[in-house]
Amino acid sequence: MKVSFHRQALTEVLALATGIVPSRSPKPVLGCVRLSTASLPTGRAVQVVCTDGEMTLETYLRQVDIKQDGVLLLPAIKFAEIVNNSPDETIAITASNEKATLTGQDSSYTLLGFGVEGYPPIESFDGKPDFSIQAGALKRMLDCTRFAAAKEMSRYAINGVLFEVKSKKLSLVATDGHRMAQAREDIQADEVKDLSAVVPIKAITHIEKLLSDAQATIEMQFRENKLFVQVLAGGEENGQKAVKASFSATLVEGVFPQYQDVIPKDCDRKANIQGAPFSSSVRRASLMTSDDSRAIKVAFTNNQLDLVGRSPELGEARITMPIEFTGPATELGFNPQYLLDAVKVSPTDSFSFEFKGQGPALMRFGKAFVYVIMPVTIP
């Protein structure tokens, strides 16, 4: 192999790769990236592949000058360190017999690689997608849900985001048992089939890194126990969209909870609240809470909201703000961080807060994002 790379483009690809390859593994080849020259419908490129056994990323570098075809397997982290610290605009790689020479204007590195025959086989995106969605829309949906997923690894079935498709509508849902976030969006597909699958949080993190171009088209395919994602460039090359990257991940096993059952119905109390003043009030009230009393009281009265934070060792904070409220006066306790998390990612400036008695509350941010939060006991 003999290729000259645009260094900044190579740096960006290796940043994605090093986030996936394991830092330690009984299989040293999993700590490597595989580089191979390729002829695509949109032109010549170098394919960069990395995997940890559960997730796989394939990206394509088109800002290259290919002088000799070949395949190369290099240790990802050390390769990235060399490229990141280079001051050059371009870096040339010449490789043979599992050894690569990286050359800049005033530098030369010899980096020992591995035999490509030991690299695991890679499953790729195959055939038509189950559906397509714009990258900007998918990123908004992930931002509105992923924060609510369970963090404890013992709750494996909810350590991820549920992808559910019904009637050309994509719904993303996450829950940790104390709260639930759901985002919905229209999708594009010739024939939409209903599906339901839980994508692990680690995979969600890497998918979000591929959504930097809001105009890019994201194609998704669910096959057996895996998700396959293909990122198509926003523009076109040679009359068709170029594949920027492909990603696959093993899905979460287990049964996701029946989340529809926890969404409050027949609410007899409703408040319309402005997001920014509400966030400020919650933050200020929570200043007087402690680790032992991590809750604030939220009192709804006629067109007024009182937020009280109190702890025996600190004292008390009381914040008042105007709202539109219908229904009998009610006091509830909530984890302030859970309230802030939802408003932080809100796609709207205001939201409705709906509930019945002392039951769970529904925060509704337009038609595309809803959030259910369980009240807590105030000490």
Image: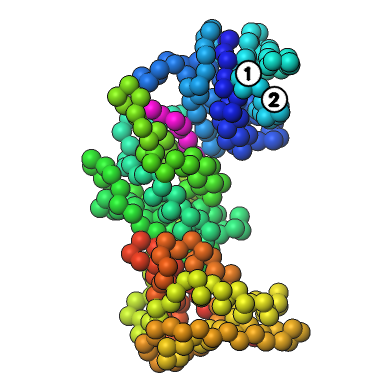
Residue, disc 1: 91
Q: In the rendered image, which quarter contains the N terminus? A: top right
- Would you call the spot at circle 2 few (<14 residues within 10 Å), some (14-19), or many (20 or more)? some
The answer to the question of whether label 2 and label 1 lie on touching residues, with beta carbons closer than 8 A, is yes
x and y percentages locating residue 284 in the rendered image:
62, 77
How much space separates mark 2 and mark 1, taking CA atoms? 8 Å
- Extreme residue toward the left, this view: 190
Q: Residue at x 40, y 17 (%)?
A: 43
Q: In the rendered image, which quarter contains the C terminus? A: bottom right
Query: Which region of the structure is painted magenta?
Result: 242-250
Kind of residue at badge 2: Ser
Question: Which one is in front, 8 or 224?
Answer: 8
x and y percentages locating residue 237 in the rendered image:
35, 24
Kind of residue at badge 1: Ile
Residue, disc 2: 86
The answer to whether residue 376 is left or right of residue 171 is: right
**Color encoding of the figure:** rainbow
Above or below: residue 159 compared with residue 26: below
Q: Residue at x 69, y 25 (%)?
A: 87
